[in-house]
Structures are given as C-alpha cells and as structure tokens.
Amino acid sequence: AASDVYKRQTMNIVVLCGGTSTERDVSLVTGYRVCESLRRNGHEANMLDIFLGVDDSEVKTFFTEKNDLGELSDNLKKKTADIPAEVKRRTEARESFFGRNVLELCKEADMVFMGLHGSNGEDGKVQATFDLLGIRYTGTDYLSSAISMSKELAKKVLVPEGIPMPKGVTLHKGHKIEYVPFPCVVKPCCGGSSVGVSIAHNEKEFEDALDEAFSYEDTVLVEEFVDGREFSVAVLDGKALPVIEIEPLEGFYDYKNKYKAGSTKETCPANIPEDIASQMQFWAEKCCQAAGVTTYARVDELLDKNNNIFCLEINTLPGMTDTSLIPQEAAAVGISYDELTEKIIEISLATVSYTHLRAHETDSYL
C-alpha cells in the first residue's frame, strides 16, 4: 500500500507549470492553487515556469521563499503573449525548451508536482527527460502520457480492449475526406481543454472546423457526433471516484465553459442510475489500465439517449483550478483539496519506490 512506503515529511517541492501550450494560463492557475495547498500542508514549495525558469539569484532561496503566489501567477500570465516569439527564437538558435535553472531545481527537489497541461508537459516528453535524470515527479509515466495525449494513439490502444468510443477517422493536413456524416466533431489530435474543437453540421462548418483545428496541429480527428449528456470520472490510484455530470449553460463543454466560473452546472455524484454510474466507473478504470496510466487521471465520457456510454479521452494531468472536476469528485468522498494534493504525492512516491524495487529484482535475477 502507498502508506507503507510513504512517511509524511516536509519536502522541497517544485510545482512545475506554465510552459508553451495553448493551456499555459490554465496551468499557471493549477500551479498557483497546488502550491498554496502544499504550503498549507507544511512543505517548502514554490511555482516554477518550465519554459521561463528563474534567474541565478533566485535559486538559493527558491524553496524557502514565501513569495506571493497570486502575484507570481499574474506576472507569469503577463508574459504569455511573448511566448510564441521566444519559442521561435529558441528553436532557430537550437536552445533548450527548459528555462534557466529549471532542471537544476527539479534535480534538487524531493518531488516535482506536475502542474503542466497540454503539449510539452502532458505528452510524456518532460516525464521521459525526468526519468533519464532521476527526477521524481507526480503522475503517470512518459509512455502512458504519450498514448493518452494522442487521441489517435488512444483509440488504437483502447478500442481493441473493448472500450466504447465514438467512431472516427484521423486526417493529416492536405488530405481530403470523401464522406462526412453530419453532425460531426472536429478536434486537434493532441490538444487539450477543448481548444480548437468544433461541431460541424454542414460542409461549410466542416471546412471552417478543419481550418480551426489545423491551425493548432497538422493532425486532426473527425468523429461522429454523439448527442448525449457529458460526464467525467476521475481515477485515483486505480480506483474510480464518483461520476460528475457537466452541463454547459450554452453550447458544449469547450474552453470557455471549462474555465469561466458559472458557465457550467456540475453535479457530483451525477444524478444517474447506480448501474450506469458503476459502468462509467468501470470504463474509466479500464481506460487507465489499458493505457498504463497510474497515480491519477480523468476520463471524459458521454451517455446517449439510449444509455450507451462512450469514452472520449484520458486526461493524465487534469486541472486543479477553482473550477476543475477532480477536486469536486474527491470532495464527494470526503477528500479535501489539501488531502488530494498530499495523496497524489503519496501515490507517486509509492509508484517510484515500487518501480525501483522491481528493477532491482530484475537486475538480481539477471
């Protein structure tokens, strides 16, 4: 059990957030809230923008600095508009994605709490780097992150396991699709927070939807539109939490409805028959098992008018903002926000210890 491995102690923790994805600003809010919580829990924690880093003068006092996290988050948000130009500059100069002193501080930390969302954070690249450097981090590993982030790969892994998902086809930029049943959903293959997602009801809307999705990525997914209610199920340490229903007051659960307070009604536990709730929880656990996802995640699902369930995607670093779903689901079973952040660290440490133990046993056997 996780509690056998983990002993409560004060730790130096980097809360890694920001970055370069379309979900950068949401990540900064997650980082802010998580860091506040970890400080309340007694840890020496501070926020660190993975792309911007910190100056040399800030390294020595990074963990013990009791800075104003809200002010730090706001200042980092003000720099968001400059990120594309800096990405271009670093790419052309062949410079590192990681900001100044980021890897050094992460190596020094007892744990890195992953507050990143979207590309270059949730797709496994950072996790793979940390694995090679021996850096401990929260959440699942690089491979399951990569599988879950790519909606194309996820379908290839989950559907053969019998997991119900909407029918769909992958399109690459420049390719044409012969026939499209309307309405349909068009989404970037690796995007998050519903950025670039559209519902098309005719040819004109479909062309516009493709232009929108392709503006974010070179690969998009076109799926059948499932007319139904929207739900999400968090999975914590392999066990599903109560189902939450998401009812946008307007449109569908897009970026605005996800993060604008008051734009969505959320009910947890969801007002659905117990057998359907149990089935949704089963599929959420099954999705995580099939993709190899550990620690915690959130699986989005739909329920159509005939009570058919469809799994949409796995979020391996779900949001921890004021309007996020996983804290609400945890609260429904008596787990407070502060207990949730502590539990995520506990499970992550236990997973690391178990992995190292298994690796040692294999080496001995060989």
Image (cartoon, helix red, strand yellow):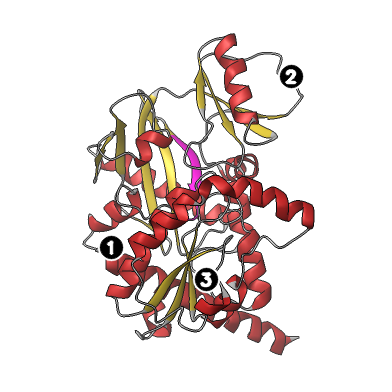
Q: Amino acid at mark 3?
A: Tyr
Q: Quadrant of residue 258?
A: top left
Q: Amino acid at mark 1?
A: Tyr
Q: Nearer the viewer, residue 244 or 363?
A: 244
**At numbered mark 1, what does the secondary structure look like: helix, strand or loop?**
helix
Residue carrying label 1: 337
Image spot of residue 113 (x, y percent) = 46, 68
Which of the labelled discs sits on residue 8, or is there none? none
Mark 3 vs mark 1, CA separation in Å: 19 Å
**At numbered mark 2, what does the secondary structure look like: helix, strand or loop?**
loop
Instruction: Specify whether residue 312 is painted magenta.
Output: yes
User: Which residue occupies 32% across, 67% down?
Assistant: 36
User: Which residue occupies 56% across, 31% down?
Assistant: 187
Q: Which residues are magenta?
A: 310-317
Residue carrying label 3: 137
Which of the labelled discs sits on residue 176, or is there none? 2
User: Is most of the magenta stretch helix, strand or loop?
Assistant: strand
Q: Residue furthest bottom?
A: 364
Q: Nearer the viewer, residue 238 or 187?
A: 187
Seen in the image, is 319 located left or right of residue 354? Answer: left
